[in-house]
Image (spheres, rainbow, N blue to C red):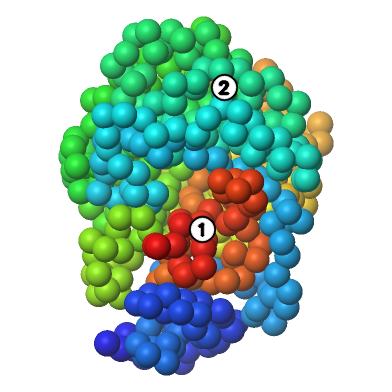
Amino acid sequence: MRSPLPTLSPPRVLKQARSRCPICHAPSDGAVIESDGKVYLKRTCPTHGERTVCIASDVRFYNVSCGSGCCAEAQPFDVLSTCVALIEIVSSCNIACPTCFSDSPRSSGVDFVPFDEIKARVDGVVARKGKIDILQLSGGEPTLHPDLFEILEWAQSHTGIGYVLVNTNGLRLAAEVDFARALERSWRPGKLQLYLQFDGPRAEGQRELRGADLRAARERAVTAAGAFREGGLPITLAMTVTPENLSQAWETIELGLRFPNVRGVSFQPMFFSGRLPEAFGDLCALPRRLNTADVILAAIEQSRGRLRVEDFTPLPCGDPNCAWIGYLLRSDEGVRSISELVDLRSLQGFLRDRVNYNLADLDRCGCESEPLGKLLRSLEIDASHTFRLFVKPFMDALTWDEDRIDRCCTHVIRPDGKLDSFCRYYSGFPGTWNAPH
């Protein structure tokens, strides 16, 4: 099947690309092309022919970061900056999401990584690379680990770890009082945050993503964490975005703003790794594939003027097409965009090689005379006043651009202790750690 490019305007080649065939996953050369204000990735496989996908529905949200269109030399991950180091501490889960990128099984028992092995793998990365800015505990469902609280106490006190994120569906926090109390006891303010699976406030898309409607449980989890001491355990709502729930982007932001301990929303367009490729077959036959521009433009349109294009900027730490970020500012006068006060792209010079922005960083974007600096100081510079909007489009075989892998800063600590790109680790490509056997 061929997927021809639109002919509304003359195509313009933005760069050459090293991609993959979405059918057989073989390396396939291609190009990134702009046509009619959109950006397409086109590649040709000797066996399966030409395949094309839209990777930016608005060219303003695509950045050509290599002058030649293709990095001349890939750097090993032990040399590249590691902004986020993810480690799977369990492979089991308490639900069976149809969209699970790691294909974690639901089971009565728990298949977990021993605590000593977790420590050895993390310490090995710190010894080779220095401090890990963010350590992300994942799975499966990491809250099932029998030594979870010991792991959290160790990680939060580790001088080589800046901050700890826990990926969770929130079910234990929502339903188990003893678990919540133990989590509060182990939490050190300023060192830990939950990355809470969240699929929007309406019914559309819930069962397709999780096999059940878990909205009430997610809200109970947010409320339970908000009752912790010192203003509550911080949470980021991690929303897998599909065509079914895209219309809920701004509603999700508004819901998060209702809770002082919710620090932002991470929007992740659904990508096709783990269980999904087998369920969907030919990825090119999908009726609609969401990208960063789709998410940002939907949120702007739904916000009725409270968000603007200028409120978002690509992160400078890795490839600029790997993540976009924006901030809203909570004040006594209501919610404002930080971009009203400062050009977000001016932050990039001194925030390079980092993803964990904080208020002190934002304060540096101006001097004492700058309105943002004055406003942040007047708010007593407390993280509860900022609300982060993060768009993270992970790649699969259909959207694969090797340039992004070559500059990746979101890494997985593999079972052998080595680092790999998140997208490649979960790709299932031949020769990768998670490739089918």
Q: Nearer the viewer, residue 308 or 296?
A: 296
Residue that mark 2 sits on = 152
Residue 361: percent from left, percent from top: 73, 36
**Residue 399 falls in which quadrant of the image?**
bottom left
Residue that mark 1 sits on = 433
Q: What element carries label 2?
A: helix
Q: What residue sits 60% from the left and 55% below the top?
A: 420
Q: What residue type is labelled 1?
A: Trp
Residue 320: percent from left, percent from top: 61, 61
Task: Kindly report the distance in space between the C-alpha atoms of the residues bearing marks 2 and 1.
Answer: 26 Å
- The disc, 2 or 1, on the residue closer to the chain's N-terminal end is 2
**Residue 252 falls in which quadrant of the image?**
top left
Q: Nearer the viewer, residue 365 or 419?
A: 419
Question: Residues at badges 2 and 1 in contact (C-beta under 8 Å)?
Answer: no
Residue 357 vertical placement versus 403 (above, below): above
Residue 310: percent from left, percent from top: 56, 53
Q: What residue sits 42% from the left and 70% below the top?
A: 397
Q: What residue sits 51% from the left and 58% below the top?
A: 433
Q: From where the camera sits, is residue 386 visible?
A: no
Q: What residue type is labelled 2?
A: Leu
